[in-house]
Amino acid sequence: MLASAPAHAQLEWMQKAAGKAAGAFNPRVTKLEEYAKLMSMHDYPGAAAIAEALVKDDLTARDSLLNVLNRNNSNLQQSAGMAAQAQAGAKNYARAIELLQIQLDAVPELARRVAPAGLLQPKLELARLYGLIQQPEPASAIYRELLASPSMIAGIENDIHSRYGQLALEQRDWATAEQQLLLAIDGGTAAGTGPQGMLAGLAGVFGATREMAVALNDTLSISDASGQVVMDTSEPVIAKEMLEQHDPLLGLAELYWRTGRSKDVADLYQRRFRKHVEAALTRIPAALRQAGSANRKLELEYARMATLLAASGRDDLATEALNQALQLNADRLQAMQKNTMPEALGASMRVRRELLALALSLQLRQPLPAGKDMAEVIGLLLQSKSLHSELLAERVQAVALSPDADVHRLWERLNELQDHQPGAVKERGELSVKLLARIGPQLRIAELGQGADFITALRRQLQTAGLWSVSAYTPFDFTRQEFSSPRYLGVLIGAKDLKFADLGEVTEIDRQVTVLRADLSAPPTPGARPPIPAAARQLYQQLLQPLFGKQLPAGAYLAVLDGALGLLPVEALADANGHYLIDSTEWRYLSSARVLLRERAAGSHDGRALVMASPGFDTALPAAGAARTALAPALRSMRFAALPETLDEGRAVATALSRNGTVVELLSGEQATAERLQASHGPRYLHIASHGFFLEEAGTELVNGKGRDGQAYTQATFNSGTSSGIALAGANRGVGGDGHGEGLLLTAQLRQLDLHGTELAVLSACETGVGSPRIGESIESLRQALEVAGAQSTVTSLWRVASVETRDTMAAFYDNLGKGRGKAAALRQAKLSIKNKQAHPFYWAPFIITGAD
């Protein structure tokens, strides 16, 4: 029956029947079009107002002579159904129930007898709404009525049994819940190949699509008109969806757990759930199975079953279920890499991290967590970190190496679109799909294998070095079936051993990091002997002592750090004896442990070095100069002071490199332009001595619109590509007056550079290593941008740097490289030479090296 169909379907039918031009002459069609438009925009109150007006008119006309041609009250059925849909969207459930009753009452008796299926949709919606307002009795009565009318529910009996069972479960009516859920399960097994089974298989696709939408918009949060945050993307995805899975098998497992029938939970998993998943996988169409997105629902079902198995004391089966969820997720991510842009995979990777958090929680609750299961989870955790950045880098490389002019045209236009307005987001998605179609065959797929194998491969690469990793995860309480506050897990991998320890709550540790960074980045009082900051000792005790003991053994270490810890110079921590770690240890940072195993393409550099120093910030650039971009107001307020001292640094660096036989191009003043940098291709060394900046507000954009409940909302998005950058010639003109960003090279533009073959990129500017910490990914900063662009290793700074010490550090660094030292050792020696003159970490600790040695 048309009146029970969704609004957009009704509109499409009417347009086909009467032609689109009819809207100009038929006021009702015009109102339907406006209603459909508002519903598509989630403006539910606006749509409800239109539909309610139609209901009022249709009620008035119901008994009039004009209704002679409309004895079946189809208009009233239509308008009441539309109004109910809009009011439910606006969470006006009581009014939506009234409207559904009006819709049902408007169906003539003859239609009830001849076509009872037309009553089905409004009745199901009525039952759903009664459940939402905690009125189970009328909802149960509707389900019983429907189940007593087989002709009305033909083909969807199992769905009715499942809904009724879930309602009874929520009301703790255990007997009814078990009866209905078993009927749904038995019927589903028999009819699993029917339309309902196919639709269930498609649920994962819709979930994956929602993930992509959030990722593409870089959504941070959504606030209502009063400023109250109603959506926070930092909340676990699984907490929102996994615990609300309404599959009848999971409902029955929950019932068994709640009623203390632990053995039945295990039997249900072993005898029925496994077969259910196997059957579901066979029902997924081949095209969707190849794309991988359909796995998502099954991942969450396995995860939910695992939590119930663990709560029932079957940790062995829970481990198996989580392993299956992780494997489905790995298959999905690997398949999606072939046909989905990297930006859209961020939320899907987040689901993987949360599945791993469940697996970690399960292992850590053991009295003595150890053995192959824990090693497997740790390996998967390390293997999964910074996948997003790796995929971005792979795409940049494929574009750089492509001879196709259309690829470069698409890439240029794609990177011009940095805002989050609907039009830009839509175009960005369309361009990315076209780009992926052209470069897809050249992309390497990031494999997600076994965790234990990953650790074995790491050990072969580590040799005598130690790998220290700290990862944030959100623990799950299997007894209470809820997530708790995020914590850090520390891992130490050596050539032969594997250690791990829970390090504490993320909030408290991040607070200490903030305190220490404030201490380190503040210039000390001249002449005073600087004490070791208390936070430097405290963080050592909390982060390293559980794994290394009170004193860190001398040697070389690699650090893979998560969240705010990526802003921490580990060398500036102090052990129990009051010694800075730089005194006896060498540190190199990695965005991901995968870097150690990555096969790098043969270098394409020409052996030259490009050094840029002391740019002319007030230079007037020609019209065809640097790339232009829309500027955030925060960037408009910046002014860059001249840096004549960096010319000394540039000359010192050029001299040191020349002594090594490297041909150096030194650009300064008006020659040190963004355009010149963008035109370079894979210099062996890239060194930029200029101002760098990180302004979080410059990357934050507020987009006003309507939410799903029709209310006015503000969507806060964050684009790391516009929050940081470096200033080059013409920057002051680019940020002032009618400037369009000339002279600025933002992170988004740095990612587009061709640095494949570049062995080392150095940004000896202020805060070039600072950025937005994101759990599970490397710091989104200029440093990450250089890695994405192809640089094998980078040197960046964590706070505003003293010019003289910067010059001396860099000159010594390049001299040490010329003597054959590795990059990490060369930088450590340069920093120690500064420390011997200036003991405070402000002078020697800001620069860190990331990437290959």
Image: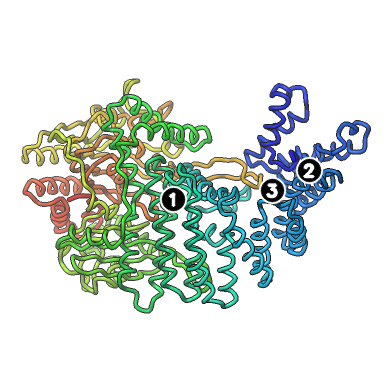
- Count of number-bearing discs: 3
522 vs 740, nearest the viewer: 740
741 vs 375, nearest the viewer: 375
594 vs 8, nearest the viewer: 8
Q: Amino acid at mark 1?
A: Ser
Query: Residue placed at 25% from the left, 40% from the top?
Result: 790
**Quadrant of res 663:** top left
Residue 329 rendering spot, x and y as whole percentages: 41, 54
Spatial CA distance of label 1 from label 3 is 29 Å
Q: Amino acid at mark 2?
A: Ala
Q: What secondary structure is marked by label 2?
A: helix
173 vs 459, nearest the viewer: 173
Spatial CA distance of label 2 from label 1 is 39 Å
Q: Residue 495 has which mark?
A: none
Characterize the local packing of mark 1: few (<14), some (14-19) or many (20 or more) Cα atoms within 10 angstroms.
many
* Residue 538 visible to the viewer: no
Residue located beneath label 1 in the image: 348
Q: Is residue 597 left or right of residue 234?
A: left
Question: Are dots 1 and 3 in contact, CB under 8 Å?
Answer: no
Q: Between disc 2 and disc 1, whose residue precedes?
A: 2
Residue located beneath label 2 in the image: 80
Give the vertical position of 357 relative to 444 (above or below): below
Query: Residue placed at 31% from the left, 48% from the top?
Result: 446
Query: Residue placed at 47% from the left, 63% from the top?
Result: 274
Q: Is residue 699 left or right of residue 845?
A: right
* Residue 686 visible to the viewer: yes
Q: Amino acid at mark 3?
A: Ala
Residue located beneath label 3 in the image: 90
Which of the two marks, 1 or 3, is nearer to us in this view?
1
**Quadrant of res 410:** top left
Characterize the local packing of mark 2: few (<14), some (14-19) or many (20 or more) Cα atoms within 10 angstroms.
many
Residue 677 rendering spot, x and y as whole percentages: 25, 31
